[in-house]
Amino acid sequence: GYWALSAAVSLVAFILLHLVTIKIILSGCDISDEVNRQKNVGVAAISAAISFAIGSTMATLLGA
């Protein structure tokens, strides 16, 4: 019960933080167009690095 609720809240927080951070850092950039059509690996690498940073920060703050 408690763990499922905690995991769901953490997942929602991660998704929201990721979306906000991507919008701030890559403002004015269509990410799906850059990665899929133009094969821009740099945008994908930045997105992956942001995901990793947010995940490790959350894990540290939650005491994992």
Image (cartoon, rainbow, N blue to C red):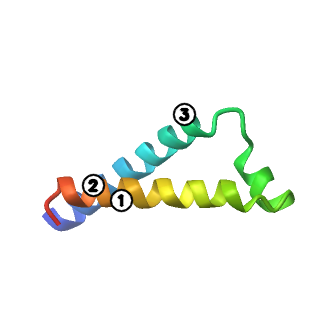
Identify the disc placed on residue 24: 3
Q: Is residue 33 above or below residue 26?
A: below
Residue at the image position 85 percent from the left and 57 percent from the top: 38
Q: Quadrant of the C terminus?
A: bottom left
Q: Is residue 18 above or below residue 56?
A: above
Question: Do residues under tags 2 and 1 come within 8 Å of each other at their CB atoms?
Answer: yes
* Residue 5 in picture, x, y percent from top left: 22, 59
Identify the disc placed on residue 58: 2
Residue at the image position 49 percent from the left and 40 percent from the top: 21
* Residue 30 in picture, x, y percent from top left: 74, 43
What's the amino acid at mark 3?
Answer: Ile
Mark 1 to mark 3 CA distance (whole Å): 18 Å
User: Which residue matches tag 1?
Assistant: 55
Mark 2 to mark 3 CA distance (whole Å): 19 Å
Mark 2 to mark 1 CA distance (whole Å): 5 Å
Residue at the image position 72 percent from the left and 39 percent from the top: 29
